Image (cartoon, grey):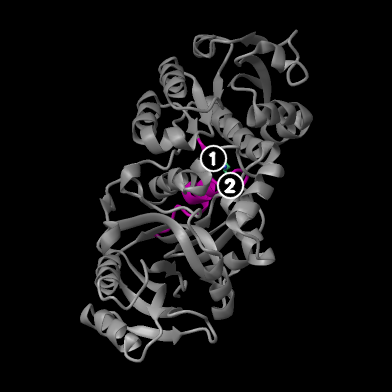
C-alpha cells in the first residue's frame, strides 16, 4: 500500500473540509484507489485554531507555509490559503522540490495559471485545480478527460453561487438587490465585502480557467469583459419574466471557426425553456457543447466546505496516481489550435434594451432609425401601459449584432433628446442549436 504525505496550507472552510473528509472516507478512498493519505503538516495563521480539525499529536502545525514545501515527508501540497503572493511562492517552491500541488485558488490561476502550469509541466509534477471552478462539480476533469475528443464550441456557466442566490431571490420574491444581498450575507452565501462576487470578478477568474482547459491557452484576465449584478434594476427582472426569460450571471466561453475565442461574464437573459434558467439558489451549473458529444450539462454546489473538499480530494488522488506511476499528469496542456482572443466589441449577441422614452408620437420611429442606421434589426417592441410621466419605459428586443454597433447605436440614441438617460442593455442568450 502506497502512502502519501499531505501538507495543507490553510485550514479554513475548505482546508478543514479536506482534513475532515480525508479521515471520514479514508477506508473508501483507500479501497478504491489503493493509496493511503496522511496529513503530515498544516500551515495556518493561528495553530490554536487547528484543534478539532486535525490531531496535533500527528500533524505538525506551523505558521510558515514554506516549511511544507521543504518537508520531505510531504508528497502533495494542498494550497488553500487565499491571496496570491504567498500561494504563488509556495506552489513554485513545492513544484521545484518535486512535490505535487493541489489548489482551489482561482484568483491565482487567473493571474499566473500559464506560469504555474508550465512550471508543473517542466518538473513533470501534478498540479490540480479542480476546486477552482464550480466547487464540487468535476467540470475541469470533464474538459480534460471526458471531453478530450472535442473541440469545445461553447461553455455557458452559472459559476458564482453568491450571484445566483441573489438573482434567484430577486426573480422569485421580487425583493430588491440590497435586500437579497443582505439575505445572502445572513445565510453565509455572501461575504461581508461582496465585491469580488457581485461585480463578477470571481466568475471572471473561473472563466479564464475554463477557457484554458477548453482551448489550450490562458487568456489574460484583463481581456475578459466583466459586468456584475449590482447595477441591475428590479424592473428588468419583471420585464424579463413577462418576456419569458430569467436573468442569470453567465460566464461564456465560445470558439469560432477561425480559431478565435470569446470569453466574458455578464448578466444575461436566459430563456425559461433552457435548463440554466431553473438553476436557482446558490447552485452552479455549466452547459458545455462539444463538436463530437453535442450538449452536456453539469450541476451542483459551487462552494462550501464539503463540496469544495470533494474536488480537492479528487485532485489529491489524481496526484497520487501520477506520482505513483511516475508519469506526468495530463494537465489539459497548452496547444496552439486556438490562442486568439475575440475582442468583446466584436462579439455578437441579441439584446434586451430598455429606454426611458419621451411619450410622444414619432419617438419610436426616431429610435428605430438609429438602430436601422447601424444595421441592427428589432424583433420586438413593448411599452407598458398606463405609465405616468413624460417618459415611459420602452423595451426593444434587438436581433444579433456586434457589441460595437449596439454601443454606437445606444450612444446615438442618447444624444437625440427623446430619452431621459442611458439605456439599459442586457444580452440575450438563445442557446442556438
Ligand atoms: N464565492 C464563490 C461563489 C465561491 O459564490 O460561488 C468560491 O468561488
- Specify whether residue 283 is in view: no
In the depicted structure, whether residue 173 falls above or below residue 336:
below
The numbered disc on residue 32 is none
Closest to the observer, 48 or 131: 48
Q: Quadrant of residue 21?
A: top right
Can you give x and y, in whole percent of width and height, for residue 207 in the image?
Answer: 43, 49
Q: How many labels does the image show?
A: 2
Closest to the observer, 138 or 367: 367
Per the rendered image, the range of residues in magenta is 129-152
Q: Is mark 2 within 8 Å of ligand 1?
A: no
The numbered disc on residue 138 is 2
SS type, badge 1: helix
Can you give x and y, in whole percent of width and height, for residue 192 in the image?
Answer: 60, 37
- Left/right placement of residue 239 relative to residue 109 reads right
- Left/right placement of residue 413 relative to residue 94 reads left
SS type, badge 2: loop
Residue name at image x 28 percent, y 75 percent: 417
**Marks 2,1: beta carbons within 8 A:** yes
Crowd around label 1: few <14 · some 14–19 · many ≥20 (10 Å): many
Can you give x and y, in whole percent of width and height, for residue 41 in the image?
Answer: 63, 13
- Left/right placement of residue 37 relative to residue 373 reads right
Can you give x and y, in whole percent of width and height, for residue 204 in the image?
Answer: 43, 47
Residue corresponding to mark 1 = 130
Give the residue furthest to the left: 373
Amino acid at each position: 500500500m502506497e502512502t502519501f504525505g499531505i501538507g495543507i496550507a490553510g485550514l479554513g472552510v475548505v482546508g478543514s473540509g479536506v482534513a475532515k473528509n480525508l479521515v471520514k472516507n479514508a477506508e473508501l478512498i483507500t479501497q478504491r484507489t489503493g493509496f493511503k493519505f496522511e496529513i503530515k503538516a498544516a500551515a495556518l495563521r493561528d495553530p490554536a485554531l487547528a484543534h478539532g480539525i486535525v490531531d496535533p499529536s500527528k500533524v505538525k502545525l506551523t505558521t510558515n507555509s514554506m516549511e511544507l514545501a521543504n518537508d520531505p515527508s510531504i508528497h502533495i501540497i494542498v494550497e488553500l490559503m487565499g491571496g496570491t503572493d504567498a500561494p504563488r511562492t509556495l506552489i513554485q517552491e513545492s513544484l521545484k522540490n518535486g512535490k505535487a500541488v493541489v489548489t482551489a485558488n482561482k484568483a491565482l490561476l487567473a493571474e499566473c495559471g500559464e506560469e504555474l502550469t508550465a512550471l508543473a509541466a517542466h518538473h513533470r509534477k501534478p498540479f490540480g485545480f479542480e476546486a477552482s471552478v464550480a466547487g464540487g462539480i468535476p467540470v475541469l476533469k470533464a474538459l480534460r478527460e471526458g471531453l478530450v475528443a472535442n473541440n469545445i464550441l461553447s461553455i455557458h456557466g452559472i459559476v458564482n453561487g453568491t450571484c445566483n442566490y441573489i438573482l434567484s431571490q430577486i426573480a422569485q420574491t421580487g425583493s430588491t438587490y440590497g435586500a437579497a444581498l443582505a439575505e445572502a450575507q445572513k445565510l453565509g452565501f455572501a461575504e461581508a465585502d461582496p465585491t469580488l462576487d457581485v461585480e463578477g470578478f470571481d466568475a471572471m477568474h473561473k472563466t479564464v480557467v475554463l477557457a484554458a482547459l477548453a482551448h489550450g491557452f490562458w487568456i489574460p484576465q484583463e481581456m475578459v469583459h466583466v459586468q456584475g449584478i449590482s447595477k441591475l434594476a428590479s424592473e428588468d427582472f419583471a420585464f424579463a419574466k413577462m418576456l419569458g426569460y430569467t436573468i442569470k450571471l453567465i460566464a461564456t466561453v465560445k470558439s469560432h471557426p477561425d480559431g478565435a475565442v470569446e470569453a466574458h461574464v455578464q448578466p444575461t437573459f436566459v430563456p425559461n425553456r433552457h435548463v440554466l434558467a431553473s438553476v436557482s439558489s446558490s447552485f452552479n451549473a455549466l452547459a458545455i457543447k462539444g463538436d463530437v458529444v453535442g450538449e452536456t450539462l453539469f450541476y451542483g454546489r459551487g462552494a462550501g466546505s464539503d463540496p469544495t473538499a470533494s474536488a480537492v480530494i479528487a485532485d489529491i488522488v489524481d496526484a497520487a496516481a501520477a506520482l505513483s506511476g511516475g508519469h506526468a499528469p495530463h494537465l489539459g496542456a497548452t496547444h496552439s489550435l486556438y490562442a486568439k482572443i475575440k475582442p468583446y466589441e466584436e462579439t455578437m449577441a441579441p439584446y434586451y434594451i430598455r429606454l426611458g422614452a419621451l411619450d410622444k408620437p414619432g419617438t419610436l420611429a426616431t429610435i428605430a432609425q438609429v438602430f436601422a442606421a447601424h444595421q441592427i434589426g428589432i424583433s420586438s417592441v413593448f411599452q407598458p401601459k398606463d405609465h405616468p410621466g413624460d417618459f415611459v419605459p420602452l423595451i426593444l428586443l434587438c436581433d444579433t449584432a456586434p457589441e460595437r454597433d449596439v454601443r454606437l447605436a445606444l450612444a446615438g440614441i442618447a444624444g437625440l433628446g427623446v430619452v431621459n438617460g442611458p439605456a439599459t442593455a442586457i444580452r440575450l442568450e438563445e442557446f442556438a442549436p
